[in-house]
Image (cartoon, helix red, strand yellow):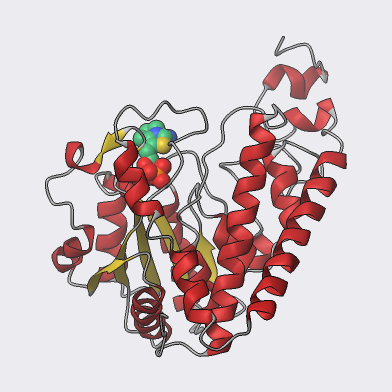
Amino acid sequence: MIKMKMLSKEKLQDIYQNAYLTRKFEEATIDLFSKGEIEGWLHSGVGQELVGSVVCTLLQEGDYIIPYHRSKSYFLARGVDPGRILAEIMGRKDGLCGGVGGEAHIADISKGLIGSSGIIGAGIPIALGTAFKNDYEDSTNITICSFGDGSVPQGAFHESLNLAATWNLPIVFICENNLYAELSPISKGMKQQDIGKRAEGYGIPGCIVDGYDVEEVHKTLETAVSRARKGEGPTLIECKTYRWRGHYEGDPEVYRTKEEVESWVAKDPLKRMEEGLLSFTPQEELLQMKTVCEEKIKEAVTFAKSSPYPDEKFLVENVYAEDFLHKGDLTWHK
Ligand SMILES: Cc1ncc(C[n+]2csc(CCOP(=O)(O)OP(=O)(O)O)c2C)c(N)n1
């Protein structure tokens, strides 16, 4: 039996519950996508539920999160209604962004969740803005900036880390390195594949952690969050993790082997946490926790499916279309 001595029962339960809720949420979206109920793309975060579930247990009201396109765990852990996230993914009126954002552009500003973006790396400079605000106001609030390894070779990453370090901004940069950027292994995109080591070049602390080890992830993030809150500046944390599904649903995955995927599935952090939880939680309590999550997701699916599509007029509001603005003519795009 695995003993998790570094985490209290309550903390481990909190993390597990959110990671399990996220897993069920992701499975529900995959199912809906396979039935043709989700239009466009779906980028599943199955296998990457842990990091967001851990970091959100360390946050306070007023903190900002810049999520990335696989960050559903961050939304759920901040108490965002799964029905409204799902409605957004399904392009429905009750979605968090009225159904016009879709799966890659979800935001809930009321909970500090600045939107994710389909433009890789685009969230990183935005973190400087929210962190600068916190710093300027002398607040203890911080910014969590999450992104994939695909952002790292970009100019936005380098410029943002350089400035965040120079200005000592209260940010925790979390790179969820799932070893692939789209369909390319990271070896095709960078020579130095230990992303945490890059911190040294910016003069800030950098850590590399096993993103499937809940205790290690918690310990590292706790130190970085506390450093940022105390005004000691940013930290770069690389969590080695893995996405179990293809880059998108339907990806033929010719760039990796079944054995590689299976080796990561065998290390499932949720299973490890379950074993840890059973050392101080009766089996019935664990089952009850799972049932609560499963019920929430069932309700979310019912809610999202029953939500109407947005009005045609709303779809083109906030879109720059001169003809439409002048003439109110909806045929411009046909
Ligand atoms: C600026 C930009 N370049 C290229 C793309 C195409 N693209 C979509 S996802 C992706 C890779 C993303 O990899 P990573 O950031 O590691 O996240 P992952 O999907 O692996 O979780 C790329 C290159 C894009 N969306 N934006």
- Tell me if 167 is positioned left or right of 331 in this view: left
- In front of the other: 296 or 75: 296
Please state, as top left, top right, bottom left or bottom right, where the N terminus lies in the image. bottom left
Please state, as top left, top right, bottom left or bottom right, where the C terminus lies in the image. top right
| Percent of width and height locating residue 5 | 40, 90
| Percent of width and height locating residue 98 | 76, 43
Residue occupying the point 56% across, 60% down: 73
Residue 249 seen in render: yes
| Percent of width and height locating residue 68 | 48, 51
| Percent of width and height locating residue 125 | 40, 54
- In front of the other: 192 or 198: 192
Q: Quadrant of residue 289?
A: bottom right
Residue occupying the point 56% across, 42% down: 104
Q: How many marks?
A: 0
Residue occupying the point 66% across, 28% down: 39
The correct choice, above or below, for 193 with respect to 111 in the image is above
Residue occupying the point 18% across, 58% down: 194
Residue 113 seen in render: no
The correct choice, above or below, for 251 with respect to 224 in the image is above
- In front of the other: 175 or 14: 14
